[in-house]
Image (cartoon, rainbow, N blue to C red):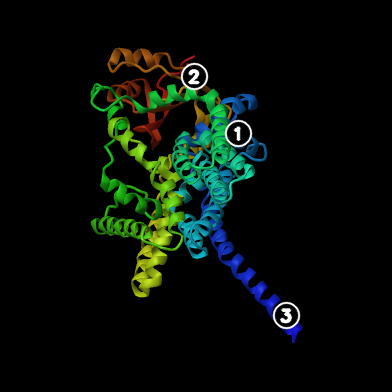
Amino acid sequence: MKEKISNLTKNQAKSDLFWQIIPITLILLLATGLYLYQLGTESLWIDELISVDRAKRDILDLLWRGRTHLILLKGWMVFGYSDSWLRGLCVICTIGSVFLIYQLGCRLASKPVGLISALLMAVSPLFIHHAQEVRMYGVSTFFGLVGTLALTFALESPNKFSLGFWAVARYLAIRSTPLNLLLLLPDIVLFGWKFRKQKRVLLSFITGLIVIIVLWSPLIIDLAIRSARFMGGFRGTVDPSVENVKSNLKSVPTIINVLLQPGRFTAWSFGRPNSTAIFWFYNLYSVMVASLIGLAFFEKRNSHKLGWAAAWGFLPLIPIFLVSQISRSLWVDRYLLFTAPYLFILLAAGFMGVWRRWRIPAVAIALIYFVAIGGGLKRYYTVKDREDWRGLVQLIQTNEQSGDVIVWKANQSRPRALNHYYRGSATIEVRIDEPEDNPQAVESWLESLPKTRSRIWLAYANPSPTLLSGIEKKFKVEEVDKIKVDGTLELFLLTPRTSEI
């Protein structure tokens, strides 16, 4: 009898272990499939090319002042250099983030909340997009979640190991994307309030903060200078005639933007759909998602821990929202990405609250979500949004002839696309000078182009009508290709009307 009971207990334990592993394993496999699908279909776009270029710097320089993802990318590039391989680093980090949000959701709420949160991240077009980029956002989200998970252990049972792990992870997250510094705000509020009467515990936490600040201090001055240049001044204090002011000082975010943001995180992070019906569907969907997040605050199960998720999800958004009112708008999906996992947990908790009380409305909500996510995934995988630098460079390489010259005038002091993709033998000349918009200046600029008996491949950003007219007078012109990047980059194949030496 005892043996039968023992066997039943073992079988039950195996069954429980099976059902603990299988659901999250299936979600991780789904995430892997979505993140790898069409991974190398599109070319690296300019910001990805910048990351690759910066990762080529000396390793000591990267360790001193490079971002975390560049240091990791430096090592990653040792084993491969294809577009798919380079993007693979963020694929791994984002898959890791899916597992981490599952763990965090289980600790803050329940296993179903953890699974739903992981699913929300796995199929989010926004997270898929950044998983398939050679940029910092996948790495940033991963280390942000590592730090938060470590702090949840410290909040429940403070010890030097969990606090040390939290400090290291937060430092790596901040060094990857400086906006992660704002996660320290809820960290301080939550830990400081809970252990306000335990001085020794607070001292350990403060020590961790000091370590983060000390490690980060060599980068502060450089970051402050670059941030001031990036922000572009305060609204109302810049000359509206200054170039790029309109693009830098984007529209001020409103409460409506805040309410619609969870919908952008989960299903539709693109521009306005062409269809008015689809536009209103996603707006109503976003309101539904925001309402579910609101319902999470009425959950009695683990309500104080859901408060932790709310702190990590909302407190960093407050300074971003306020700064965006007076300077360059930081209310951009990719800048807010580090807060999305915590909103996913609140959304999952809100949905589970509806599920426990009203099954039919919960099923309806799930159906609406799957329709929304289906539309978002279809849009992501069928519409190409990245500039096709690879296609442009390969077009030159495939059709070049002996003696051809490439002249690169593309608003870049370094031809990163050529450095990454070009394997041909043509002479390359990079031009940073631009002729004034008059016939004499254009003629002089064209005369300064390299002399060749063969042809010139001219890549020129936003050519003026005057320049186009001057080119047609001096050369036989064939417009070969164009891509949209800071306007339009046009590629011309120029053949001299008379042979020049």
Percent x, y of residue 355: 40, 70
Percent x, y of residue 117: 47, 58
Q: Give the labeled residue for mark 2.
A: 452
Tell which circle, 1 or 3, labels the residue nearer the N-terminal end. 3
The disc labelled 3 sits on which kind of residue? Asn
Q: Front-most of 418 and 288? A: 288
Secondary structure, mark 2, is loop
| Residue at the extreme front of the image, as rendered | 197
Q: Could you tell me which residue is drawn at 43 percent across and 60 percent down?
A: 348
- Front tag of 1 and 3: 3
The disc labelled 2 sits on which kind of residue? Thr
Secondary structure, mark 1, is helix
Asked if 2 appears above or below 494 in the picture, the reply is below
Q: Which mark is residue 71?
A: 1
Q: Give the labeled residue for mark 3.
A: 7
Q: Front-most of 273 and 419? A: 273
Specify few, some or many for label 1: CA neighbours under 10 Å numbering under 14, 14-19, or 20 or more.
many
The disc labelled 1 sits on which kind of residue? Ile
Mark 3 touches mark 2? (CB < 8 Å): no
